[in-house]
Amino acid sequence: MARRLARSTSTISREVGRNGGRAGYVPDKAHRSTKRRAHQRKPGTEPSVLAPRRLETVRAVEDRMAATLIGTGLPRMSARVLAALLTTDDTGMSAAELGRQLRVSSASVSKSVGYLEGEGVIRRERIPQRRVERYVVDPDAWFQAILASAQRNHQLADSARRGSDLLGRTTPAGARLHALSRFHQQLTNDIIERARHWRPVLTELLPEASAPRM
């Protein structure tokens, strides 16, 4: 179906799931639901002809980003939540909005945002007028992640250096550990230096971006 309609598989799955599932999908009913949602739009807002294509593009980018994040080792649900937050034009999303977007339970969203908060990738903001919280990607989190990775590399370099000193740099094992220590130490120092240099890029193009954490 996706190939014949030139749409992504995820789009077809969402459409079918939204309108009764595979066993109960009724085209006429789905069409009426779509028309009803269109009539419920705010007065004065005409749906753009490009809106369906725009939505399709956003979904495709979101799916690709989620797959990439999963490939880096991020848990699947946390990757999907982070991808949704990265690809939304809103400044953030509430747990309920994330649940609807990803078609998952509130419990799944809660567990995933908790994990991402713990990693420092996202933060929560209170919306007083709505009495709800929304989750926002912290733009400076990528810099903090680089520093955390650098710290681990420094620890590896230090451990290798200590091993080299104990075994003796003139021994094959000691020389190997010494080379490993120098490589990680120098490379990590270069990465930290460049990360600090490019850190402003994370926020300078964002609307109403907050100042980076120190």
Image (spheres, helix red, strand yellow):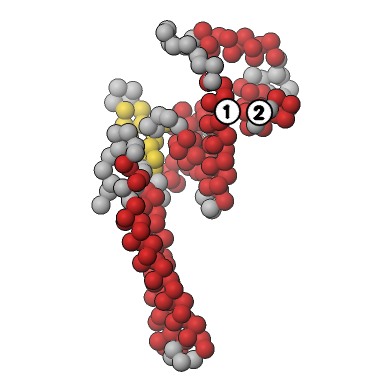
In this rendered view, identify the residue nearer to me: 97 or 60.
Answer: 60
Q: Where is residue 43 in the image (x, y as percent from the top left)?
A: 42, 7
* Residues marked 1 and 2 touching at CB (< 8 Å): yes
Instruction: Point out which mark residue 167 bears.
Output: none
Residue 178 point in image, percent of width and height? 44, 82
- Numbered mark located on residue 7 in the image: 2
From the viewer's perspective, is residue 151 above or below residue 130? Answer: below
Compare residues 60 and 130 and report the one nearer the observer.
60
Residue ID at (53%, 20%): 51
SS label for mark 1: helix
Q: Looking at the rendering, in which quadrant would you find the N terminus?
A: top right
Amino acid type shown at disc 1: Glu
At a point 39% along the width and 50% down the height, the residue shown is 142
Q: Which mark is residue 56?
A: 1
Name the residue: 39% across, 57% down.
146
When the figure is inspected, residue 129 is found, relative to residue 122, above or below; the finding is above
Q: Which amino acid does label 2 sit on?
A: Arg
C-alpha distance separating marks 1 and 2? 8 Å
Q: Can residue 40 be seen in this view?
A: yes
Q: Position of residue 48 (x, y in %)?
A: 51, 16
Picture coordinates of residue 88, whole percent (x, y)? 45, 32
